[in-house]
Amino acid sequence: MFEQAFKSIDDILWKEAGCTTELDYTEQSSWLLFLKYLDALEQDRASVAELEGRRYDYIIDKPYRWDTWAAPKDKSGKLDHNKAKTGPDLIEFVNGKLFPYLQSFKAKASGSNTIEYKVGEIFAEIKNKIASGYNLREIIDVIDTLRFRSQAEKHELSHLYEAKIKNMGNAGRNGGEYYTPRPLIRAMIKVVEPAIGERIYDGACGSAGFLCEAFDFMRRTKGLTTKQMKVLQESTFYGKEKKSLAYVIATMNMILHGIDAPNLIHTNTLTENLADIQEKDRYDVILANPPFGGGERKEVQQNFPIRSGETAYLFLQHFIKSLKAGGRAAIVIKNTFLSNGDAKGLRKKLLDECNLHTILDCPSGTFLGAGVKTVVLFFEKGKPTRKVWYYQLDPGRSMGKTNPLNDDDLVEFVALQKKHTASPKSWTVNVADLDAATFDLSVRNPNGGQVVAHRAPSEIIDEIVALDVESAEVLASIRGLL
């Protein structure tokens, strides 16, 4: 039912001239899903208040509630077509009244961790791109069939939403920055092992994949109590995100995973001066895949002791500073960091201030559509590095859209990492043996290097077919605009 609903929404959005990519599809379905979710949450809270004999104060005023403007019902519980807005009237209400009303919540909220603040922030950063009131009515009617009442329903919806985010990543270009392969995230979390009571942070959270997967990992804790679940819900996961669309998607993603009021802030993390970070601002665990390339303005670079035009290098400094003593981190970064001359000072800082105990070397194709090679740095703050254990991930095949990274590919890495076991794919380097002039940490497998896996002809044919289908869809969408 849910899968068909998502497909129907995408089919309707495909007819909209203002919605041309997977990013648009996800953005537009997100704000509508959020309002439907908020309505369900308010109904639940009102029911509990009634049973307890107390009054419930609604977050949303009556004219702007889902069951007033989007899906008013008649006495039989069916859509009341006499009251339901459609066509130009619907667009006029959404653009002229609903969005301005919801945007005002940010200023009225009592704090940034309230759901009221999230409402205001989301609608301050997003706009309705659906120009046809008739298309919008169709989408609303589909979304109104979805239910968020049970954990099973939320769980299924969260999986479908993750699939939409993955499709954004597969779309390449801007989409790839929102999606880190979930098998890689899960392996990183297994190594770091976050525990209940610790605070977990991602300062470049994208679609909040790291935070959602960490939540899933931690709520499977044996004997989890109600009090511990409240801690997970309210004071465990923290994120920051610069881009508006990513912030909205991250908020919705965390809500669907079961966190009602995510501790997410829409901000450019790098504008914070490192000198202003105090002990109270630090975290036990940091998991992140910060954006690379780009380059921040000169005044932003002034916030860092090691200035760089590479965004990822600034983020790495931020993460080191934001870790508590004894805190653990797992950070994805381009493999050029290991040898780039511009990163020499940062490599030395990392080795001096943290125990960089593990480097996971990821093969090409790990990040679909990105076309870059990456490594994952695992480190603990508070003591210098003596030895670095390397693992060269080699799934035995070339990876791509039709053959992506999976959880089985990382089983050996997680198992060997526990004791830093030597193998044909893993080895240890003493920091004392590094070139003191460069601190070059390049991946050099003493066991013969990385094996180049050649794909079977059937795999190549499958990928060609998939690319042909994708090309046909792009051409069809272009024709639709002409």
Image: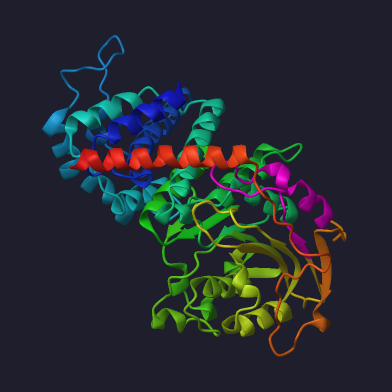
x and y, in percent, of residue 240 in the image:
48, 60
- As drawn, the residue found furthest toward the top would be 76
Q: Is residue 53 something that shows in the picture?
A: no
Q: Residue at x 49, y 75 (%)?
A: 310
- As drawn, the residue found furthest toward the bottom would be 437
x and y, in percent, of residue 471 in the image:
38, 42
Q: Nearer the viewer, residue 72 or 215?
A: 215
Q: Residue at x 68, y 48 (%)?
A: 397
Asked whether residue 383 is drawn in magenta, I would say: no
- As drawn, the residue found furthest toward the front would be 457
Q: Quadrant of the C terminus?
A: top left
Colour convention: rainbow
Q: Is residue 227 above or below residue 269?
A: above
318 sits to left or right of 354: left
x and y, in percent, of residue 115 in the image:
41, 46
Q: Nearer the viewer, residue 123 or 400?
A: 400
Q: Is residue 420 something that shows in the picture?
A: yes
Q: Nearer the viewer, residue 464 or 19?
A: 464
x and y, in percent, of residue 254 in the image:
51, 44
Label total for image: 0
186 sits to left or right of 412: left
Q: Residue at x 37, y 52 (%)?
A: 245
- Identify the magenta region: 390-417
Q: Quadrant of the N terminus?
A: top left
Figure quadrant of residue 15: top left
Asked whether residue 396 is drawn in magenta, I would say: yes
